[in-house]
Image (cartoon, grey):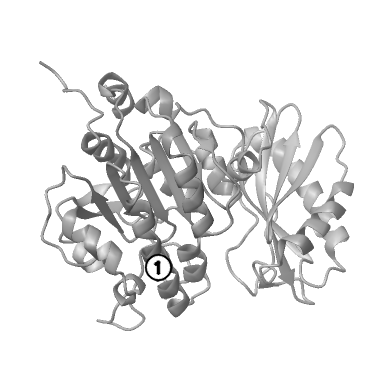
């Protein structure tokens, strides 16, 4: 029996409510050896109060030493083994903006970038071009035509867009064209397996035409494609956990993740305060609430240590509003670490806090990487977090006689 089967067998209906707050890229590193991380630097009195009443630990998103993308990072938090359930970023972005992927579709996440006169990437995110400017550029890409394939190009947010190829014989096993670095040229689409050869050829033609269309743009004069994927199949939260689940997220990719596991997207919030407003409005309609906070990740990716500290403090100030709803289980964690020092996702374990009346307090005083390493939850696979949430919410029956 695997974890999914066991959960199905033991899950029970209950009136209890679970809130999972995911501060994207929460974990960090000190800028200088022996110094403090962003989380350790931040003033977090409300999170620290939860720590003293709850239990803490450090979650491993995939495996020790493996740096996760946002998809695997969130799947683990939702209780799905990210090594068993693989979701490409393209499918997440497409689903997040409400595009219904069909059986013959392959989606890819697109990033506009800025190329210098030599065709090398000078800015991987085109200066985080505002959405209204990006949308106008996406409109120009509607002119791409490829024989034998339907092409859909949809805006997402800021520098992000989605391209979906629809046609027979397509497969998502195509390598990213993003070299994840500046000073180099975008890569060409390459098939990872023979089955994806046609998709790679289609993507190459899309890139060729897109480069011609974009060449006069002041910021978004280039593009890269990531996460080629078809539509995945996952059991839903209702099927697994017998939970009515709601997702309150700003960015489409995280909405896509939530939709793929059967969560209902709630509201159209753009700020953290608005997200908590939505949480309060829908409180009586759901059992589980996923609240996603993006900006601890984006500031980390920008190498903005002090800005990440401020974003953590912003999240801390919101905790009393969430607590006022009296959730039976309140979890605060991240999908991965994004240290400002590295300006990227990393493999480091993620600080995790679980607060519930059924917790055994572990004597910690502050929500931080160092403290969580000493916490009662220990260092554990992220895919086990939902098991702990369900148990503390008294939503599991006993296993065996």
Is residue 340 visible from the viewing direction of this image? no
Q: Image check: 95 left or right of 138?
A: left
Task: Judge from the rendering whether residue 163 lies leftward or rightward of residue 66; answer left or right.
Answer: right
Residue 17 image-quadrant placement: top left
Q: Where is residue 333 in the image (x, y as percent from the top left)?
A: 34, 54
- Give the residue at mark 1: 312
* Of the pair 213 and 159, the residue shown nearer to us: 159
The one nearer the camera, 40 or 302, is 40
Nearer to the camera, 61 or 237? 237
In this picture, is 143 found above or below 389?
Answer: below
- Image quarter hosting the N terminus: top left
Foreground of the two, 133 or 193: 133
Name the residue rendered at 21%, 59% in the picture.
Answer: 51
Q: Horizontal and vertical percent for residue 351?
A: 29, 59
Is 91 on the left or on the right of 215, as rendered? left
Image quarter of the C terminus: top left
Q: Which residue is drawn at 29% across and 29% down?
A: 3
User: Vertically, is 374 above or below 59?
Assistant: below
Using residue 342 as the reference point, say whether residue 249 is left or right of it.
Answer: right
Q: Residue at x 29, y 78 (%)?
A: 36
């Amino acid at each position: 029996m695997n974890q999914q089967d066991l959960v199905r067998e033991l899950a029970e209906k209950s009136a209890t409510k679970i809130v999972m707050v995911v501060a994207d890229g929460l974990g960090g590193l000190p800028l200088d050896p022996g110094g403090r991380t962003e989380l350790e630097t931040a003033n977090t009195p409300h999170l620290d109060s939860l720590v003293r009443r709850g239990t803490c630990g450090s979650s491993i998103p995939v495996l020790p030493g493996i740096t996760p993308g946002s998809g695997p990072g969130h799947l683990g938090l939702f209780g799905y083994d990210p090594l068993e359930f693989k979701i490409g970023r393209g499918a997440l972005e497409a689903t997040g903006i409400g595009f219904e992927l069909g059986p013959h579709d392959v989606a890819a996440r697109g990033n506009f970038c800025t190329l210098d006169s030599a065709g090398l990437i000078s800015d991987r995110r085109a200066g985080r071009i505002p959405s209204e400017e990006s949308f106008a550029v996406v409109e120009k890409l509607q002119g791409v035509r490829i024989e034998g394939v339907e092409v859909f190009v949809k805006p997402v947010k800021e520098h992000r867009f989605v391209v979906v190829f629809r046609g027979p014989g397509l497969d998502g096993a195509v390598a990213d064209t993003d070299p994840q670095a500046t000073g180099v040229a975008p890569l060409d689409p390459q098939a990872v397996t023979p089955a994806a050869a046609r998709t790679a050829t289609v993507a190459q033609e899309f890139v060729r035409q897109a480069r011609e269309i974009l060449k006069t743009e002041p910021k978004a004069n280039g593009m890269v494609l990531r996460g080629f994927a078809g539509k995945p199949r996952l059991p839903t939260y209702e099927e697994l956990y017998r939970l009515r689940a709601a997702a309150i997220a700003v960015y489409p990719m995280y909405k896509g993740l939530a939709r793929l596991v059967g969560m209902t997207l709630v509201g159209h919030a753009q700020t953290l305060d608005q997200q908590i407003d939505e949480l309060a409005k829908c409180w009586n309609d759901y059992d589980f609430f996923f609240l996603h906070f993006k900006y601890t990740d984006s500031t980390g990716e920008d190498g903005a240590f002090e800005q990440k500290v401020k974003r953590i403090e912003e999240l801390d100030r919101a905790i009393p509003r969430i607590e006022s709803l009296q959730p039976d289980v309140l979890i605060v964690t991240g999908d991965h670490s994004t240290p400002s020092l590295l300006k990227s996702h990393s493999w480091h374990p993620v600080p995790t806090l679980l607060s519930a009346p059924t917790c055994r307090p572990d004597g910690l005083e502050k929500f931080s990487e160092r403290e969580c390493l000493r916490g009662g939850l220990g260092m554990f696979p992220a895919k086990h977090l939902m098991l702990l949430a369900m148990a503390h919410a008294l939503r599991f029956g006993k296993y065996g006689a």
